[in-house]
Structures are given as C-alpha cells and as structure tokens.
Image (cartoon, rainbow, N blue to C red):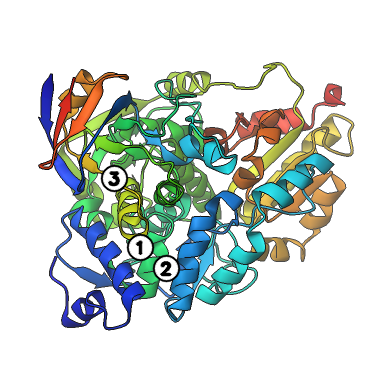
C-alpha cells in the first residue's frame, strides 16, 4: 500500500479499480465512439493510446499525466458526467490541464455526477500505480494505491 | 481570486441562478490555475468549438437551453466550428440514415440554439474563423474566449492574441459573462518558451508532420522554433500563414500546444527574440530522419493496409483560398502529365463558407470542379466519426484527422500522387 498527496480540484471520496494511461489522455478520441453509440462499458476508442485502447473506462479510477487533443475535451467529459458514464475519479500525476479542469468543473457545477478529481500526484504516482490496483481517495485528497 | 463588486454580485445571483453558475464555473476554472482576477474579453467576437448536434450531446443542448431560458443571450457574438453534414460530400444511403437519423438528429436544434446564443450569421461555421475572408480576426494583445484547438493556437501564435486552450462550453461562458480568468497564455510568463526546437531538415518539412513531431514531444509546453526562415521567410504572407495554420493544428491535436513562436516570424518572436526562451529550456532537434521516424510510427488501422483509397480529405483545418488555388495548379499539372482529366480517388477539399464564396468568383472553382474535386464547408472529422467510415479506406494530409479517425496520413505530395495516379482507376 502506498499513499500519494495531491491537490483537490473536485472534492469527494471513492474507491475504484485503477485504469492507467502513461501517455496523455486524448478525451475526444477516447470517448467519442462510446458516447455516440451508447457503449455501456465506455470502451476507450483512442487508437494512439496503447494503455487504454478498447479498455472499459466507466467506473474506473482513471490515472493519467494530463489530457491532450481537441478543445471539445471538457465538453466531452461534461457529457459523460451528465450521462452517468464518467470515470469514478480522475487522478493526474501533473498539474491539471485546462481541458480536463473544464470538464471536471462543468460536471461538478452543471450535473449531479460525482467524480472526484485530484492533480499534482507526481511522476512517482504513475510509476507506481498499475491497471487493476485498488485506489482510494480520502476526504483530504490523499490517494491510496493497493 | 479577487472579484470586482460587479463580478461578485453576479456570483451571488444578482442576475439569476444560471448566471451565478456561469460565474462560479469561471471562478473554479481560474482557481484551478491560480488566477488572481478576471480580465475583460476584448476581441470583437468569440469562437466556439461546438457546432454539431450529436444525439449523444443532448446534455449540451440542455445546458444551452438553460442559458437561453435564463435570458443569457446578449453576450459576445461568435463564430463556430464547421457543420458536420453536407449533401455534396459522398455518402451511401446507409451512411445518410446513420448521419441524419442517428448521429446528428439534434443538428437543427443545435443551430437554432447557437443562433439564439449569438452566432454571427449562417455562414459563420468554420474552424478557420481568422482568415481574411471571415470577420473574426483578433488583434495582437486581444483577450479571447475561444475554443477549437487549431484556432486558439493560431490566434495566440500567428496573431499574437491571448487565449487559453479553453474547452467547449467554457468558451461560451466567457462570452456570456464578458470576462475570463487570467492565467496561463493570458500572462506574459505563460507565453515564455519551455522548449527550443532546432529544425535541421534538408528540405522544407511538411507542416503537419513537423507540427505532429513537436506536439508529441512538448505536449502542453510552449516551443520556440528555430531554423524555419529559409522556407517561411520573415513576413507572415499567405504562404507562411497557411503553413502555420496546418503546423499549429498538428501541434495542438498531436499534443496540447496552445502557443508556439517561430524565430523571426511570429509577432512575439519578432519583437522579443530569444528573451522569450526560459532559462534551462529543453532542446529538441528535428531532422529528416526524425520526421520519417514520426510518420512511420503512426498506427494504420485499416483492416486491409493495402486497400485502394476510397475517399480523400484535404482541409482539416479548413483550407485557405491560396491553398485551394495552389492545389488546383498542382492537380492541373499532374493530371496532364498522367493523361487524365479527373482525379481517380473521390476527393473533398474543405474550406469556410466565406472562402468558398470567394473561390467561386475565380477560375479555380471551375478548374477544381472539372478535375472532380468536391468543395465543401463540412468538418471532415465530424463526417468520419462513425463506425461506417471507420471501415472506409480514407486518406488525408491532415494530422488532426489522422489522430481522431481511421484516416491514413500521407504527405501532401503523396496525396497528390495518389489521387492523380492512372492505375488507381
């Protein structure tokens, strides 16, 4: 078990299975097909992301360095939140980027979805956590990997 | 964040609950990046990345309706990304049904809502709102509330305006409120270069390949690019601007670049030179072998990698008038050389409605039509975002289109050769 302290962007607690992207998470490329065609498992559609391609994302603790790509990114995350298809939480090793922050905040202010978001967990976080690990976010934003 | 009295009143609900939520969203957005204050949006117009009425995006329609019902329709007027559908672009009966009945069933509603929220006019749908033929070209130093990664990186880099890589919806909230949080690319410090890119190619590098290599390397950082003068010169003429449009789109979609500087060419690089480069900036050297390595590493997700191309898209982002004229000249030369009258792969050139109107006043419109080229205002990316298109062998010289779809990337010269190849008949 290992603990990491980050900065809380959207507060909340959760326990979920980790899904780890070591490269930038392209939100549009990852979500577009799943949202458009009602994929219940919300499988990742980003062919350029070997860690996540075709992996179910719904309900997972999405661990990533940052998001990249189209500026529809925040809107896509908001749509996923509004449709109840969001990850359980998003955990960023780096400081959050503007598109991910937009999506997380839009989801928090404009929907009923619960998706805690913590950033600045450090490179060591992504080097430690592996897909399938159990992640817990505490009240204080401390992330536990086991 | 310190708000003015007027901003605080809005947050407290002086103009209703929905406006308070708009301001709360902008405040949280700013606080995530340490913004100390809001600054007024100073450009004439906004630009939104949202233009498509996808059935899956009903929550966006619901949010827009909340803004409209709350009377928040007097904000800054704006342009929007291209429409997703055009009957002139080839599609099968099945594709037509999927496009109109399943995917874009909310298109009419979306366009009606954009009209209510303040889109400039019916021709304001393009990702290149900044070209001469459009009326949305900010000045250096203007503060923008835009989204659309290729437009934001162009406005920041080539025009010297100031805009963060805002997301869809957030950008409209900035236009509605009239202010945006000051952080990142809105500040002098945020516009300094984290990387020096040394371009050491023998020949002029393909814009969309060079942009891709840089985007994948620097991700969200700001690159300062050296070694381009011999090809781009020192003036932002039509050729240089067209090149930088495509280059920037690739940096933004293959990475997350919101601003780049080109030594001796882009406004801030001209004015400040190497003072723009941060101490201890990282260095990335790009030569022909590096570009070749980058291109070879693109995944090809066609089922049959040797399939004959069924469709070709040129123009993501939308083409400039000059690019269409140059392509027409190149096509004329190659078709004549190969003893052909028309291209041998169905090919769509995309541009803004305003550029198409200008094109139609010239001989080039006739030439392109006679060569079999379809000219459209469509968004190729939105056209291809469905499983039916995924099965098609589509080729493109757009690295943005490659990134988001199953389209296969070729250099412009390769595309020209493929679509004018005799044996492809």
Toward which corner of the image does residue B371 lie, by quadrant? top right
For disc 1, the marked residue is B161
**Mark 1 near mark 2, Cβ–Cβ under 8 Å?**
yes
Q: Residues within 10 Å of mark 1 (few under 14, many from 20)?
A: many
* Image quadrant occupied by the N terminus of chain B: bottom left
- Residue at mark 2: chain: B
Q: Position of residue B22 (x, y in %)?
A: 33, 68
For disc 3, the marked residue is A97
Residues at marks 1 and 2, CA–CA distance in whole angstroms: 6 Å
- Residue at mark 1: chain: B
As rendered, which of A115 and B371 lies closer to the eye?
A: A115
Taking the image as drawn, is residue B313 in sight?
yes
The nearer-to-camera label among 1 and 3 is: 3
Q: Position of residue B243 (x, y in %)?
A: 52, 46
Q: Residue at x 31, y 82 (%)?
A: B15
Taking the image as drawn, is residue B178 in sight?
no
Left or right of B279, for residue A30? right
Left or right of B241, for residue B342? right
Vertical placement of residue B340 versus B170, above or below = above
Q: Residues within 10 Å of mark 2 (few under 14, many from 20)?
A: many
Residues beneath discs 1 and 3 located on the same chain: no
Residues at marks 1 and 3, CA–CA distance in whole angstroms: 20 Å
SS at mark 1?
loop
- Residue at mark 3: chain: A
Vertical placement of residue B389 versus B15, above or below = above
* Image quadrant occupied by the C terminus of chain B: top right
Left or right of B170, for residue B306? right
Q: Residue at x 31, y 19 (%)?
A: A132
């Amino acid at each position: 078990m290992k603990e990491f302290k980050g900065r809380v962007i959207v507060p909340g607690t959760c326990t979920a299975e980790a899904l780890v992207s070591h490269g930038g998470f392209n939100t549009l490329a990852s979500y577009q097909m799943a949202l458009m065609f009602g994929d219940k498992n919300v499988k990742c559609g980003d062919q350029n992301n070997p860690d996540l391609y075709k992996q179910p994302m719904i309900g997972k603790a999405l661990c990533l360095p940052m998001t990249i790509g189209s500026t529809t990114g925040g809107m896509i995350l908001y749509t996923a939140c509004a449709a109840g298809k969001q990850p359980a939480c998003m955990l960023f090793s780096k400081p959050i980027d503007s598109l991910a922050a937009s999506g997380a905040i839009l989801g928090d202010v404009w929907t009923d979805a619960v998706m805690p978001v913590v950033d600045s967990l450090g490179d060591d976080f992504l080097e430690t956590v592996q897909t399938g690990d159990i992640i817990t976010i505490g009240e204080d934003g401390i992330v536990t990997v086991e | 964040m310190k708000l003015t009295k007027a901003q605080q009143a809005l947050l407290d609900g002086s103009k209703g609950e929905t406006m308070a939520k708009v301001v709360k969203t902008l405040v949280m957005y700013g606080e995530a990046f340490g913004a100390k204050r809001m600054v007024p949006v100073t450009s004439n117009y906004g630009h939104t990345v949202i233009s498509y009425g996808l059935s899956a995006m009903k929550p966006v329609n619901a949010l827009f309706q909340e803004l409209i019902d709350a009377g928040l329709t007097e904000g800054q007027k704006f342009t929007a990304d291209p429409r997703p559908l055009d009957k002139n672009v080839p599609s099968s009966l099945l594709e037509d049904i999927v496009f109109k009945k399943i995917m874009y069933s909310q298109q009419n509603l979306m366009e009606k809502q954009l009209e209510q929220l303040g889109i400039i006019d019916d021709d304001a749908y393009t990702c290149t709102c900044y070209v001469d033929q459009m009326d949305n070209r900010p000045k250096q130093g203007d503060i923008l509330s835009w989204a659309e990664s290729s437009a934001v990186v162009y406005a920041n880099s080539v025009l010297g305006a100031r805009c963060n890589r805002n997301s869809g919806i957030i950008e409209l909230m900035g236009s509605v409120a009239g202010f945006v949080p000051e952080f990142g690319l809105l500040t002098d410090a945020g516009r300094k270069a984290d990387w020096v890119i040394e371009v050491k190619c023998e020949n002029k590098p393909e814009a969309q390949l060079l942009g891709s290599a840089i985007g994948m390397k620097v991700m969200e950082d700001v690159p300062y690019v050296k070694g381009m003068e011999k090809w781009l010169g020192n003036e932002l003429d039509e050729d240089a601007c067209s090149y930088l449009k495509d280059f920037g789109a690739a940096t933004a979609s293959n990475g997350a670049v919101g601003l780049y500087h080109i030594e001796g060419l882009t406004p801030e690089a001209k004015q400040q030179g190497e003072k723009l480069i941060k101490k201890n900036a990282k260095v990335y050297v790009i030569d022909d072998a590096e570009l070749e390595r980058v291109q070879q590493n693109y995944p090809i997700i066609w089922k049959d990698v040797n399939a004959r191309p069924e469709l070709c898209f040129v123009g993501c982002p939308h083409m400039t008038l000059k690019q269409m004229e140059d392509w027409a000249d190149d096509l004329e030369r190659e078709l004549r050389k190969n003893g052909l009258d028309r291209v041998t792969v169905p090919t769509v050139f995309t541009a803004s409605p305003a550029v198409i109107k200008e094109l139609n006043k010239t001989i080039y419109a006739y030439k392109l039509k006679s060569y079999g080229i379809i000219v459209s205002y469509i968004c190729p990316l939105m056209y291809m975002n469905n499983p039916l298109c995924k099965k098609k062998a589509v080729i493109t010289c757009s690295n943005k289109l490659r990134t988001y779809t199953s389209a296969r990337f070729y250099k412009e010269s390769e595309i020209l050769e493929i679509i004018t190849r005799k044996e492809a008949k």
